[in-house]
Image (tube, helix red, strand yellow):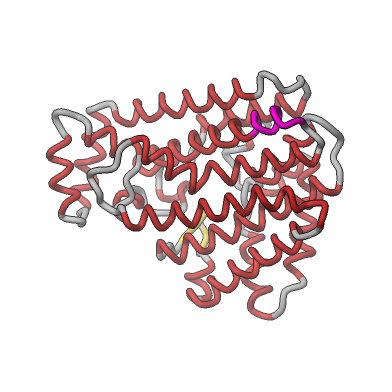
Amino acid sequence: MSIQQLYKSTDTATNTFQFPELIFVEDQLQNILSKADGLIQQTCLNLLQSGGKRVRPLLTLYSGMCFAPLNPLMLKASVAAELIHMASLIHDDVIDKSEMRRGKPTTNSLYGDYAAVLTGDYLFAEAFNILSSEQLLSSMKFFVEAIQAMCNGEVNQAEEQFSVTIGTDHYFKRIAQKTGILLAACCQSGAQLANAGAEEILCFREFGLNIGYAYQITDDILDFRGDSMSLGKPVGADLLNGNMTLPILYLLDNPIYGNWLREILRTRQITDQGLFSITEALLNAGCLEHAYLTATQCVNKAKASLSKIPASPYRTALITLSDSIMQRTF
């Protein structure tokens, strides 16, 4: 199975087969979450069993292994990264009132918002329990920055629902906050724990940010071109929630469709027919293709940022991972 095929799968077992280092991550996640009590344990283990690609632990481990063999600190940081990601997903689902993720019921839909929020808080606490050891305090700084950025990104997105005044610069700032800075933190943390130099750590920050951009933009495209079964959520969910994604921003700039779209967005209500018409306009105006090209440019920047990193199988895997983003189907 190629890495492209791998990243079209949510099967964690397949990932650990292809990347044996992830076996250690999965084992530690299972051990940590099994120690929770009662309903929190049930919600945590249910989330763990729902699968995932474990991209963030992989970035942490392989960024470090570009410089040194796998060590216990890299492994601990990678586990903390996944716990933070899992917590953020639960909180996002509560905010968005999502009923499905990866084609399975969300924690909030199964157990209610109260249990979901507390589960997310518990996962954050476990992550910082790991990062609070003296040897991981430098990594904690990266992850604290990422969590602060995610919170700011979510608040800004909520304030800007259906806004027709957002520009692409602001969009990139927001997706850095929501996605890119956490991926950058994973890469920086792994590299630092392998004693990489300051310039090399900065290269990995750029790598993480740019694959974060590419990942979010392809997510924007799939919101219109995916199918609900693969996405695990309704097609057009971002637009229906008023989230201004890159294809929509490109359509707002279109001389033919821009004013028409502004009038629809000002109603703050998107009907089924409106969603269909907007999707057709995105296709006719080439906005989805434009967004795809922008994502490709971000991937190219990500790969270029690794040009100063010593050649190794792990650098090659990270470069191939960057390319695989452009073949996502969900």
Q: Is residue 187 above or below residue 287?
A: below
Left or right relative to 21: residue 42: left
Quarter holding residue 86: bottom right
For image coordinates 43% across by 62% down, the residue present is: 98
For image coordinates 85% across by 33% down, the residue present is: 68
Residue 286, percent from left and from top: 28, 26
> Mainly helix, strand or loop, the magenta region?
helix
For image coordinates 77% across by 25% down, the residue present is: 313
Does 265 appear in magenta? no
Give the extent of the magenta segment: 197-204
Residue 210, percent from left and from top: 53, 32
From the viewer's side, name the closer residue of 160 and 238: 160
For image coordinates 22% across by 32% down, the residue present is: 253
| Rendered-image quadrant of the N terminus | top right
Left or right relative to 144: residue 225: left
Left or right relative to 51: residue 234: left
Q: Is residue 168 above or below residue 302?
A: below
Q: Residue furthest front?
A: 198
Residue 13, percent from left and from top: 72, 48
From the viewer's side, name the closer residue of 67 and 70: 67
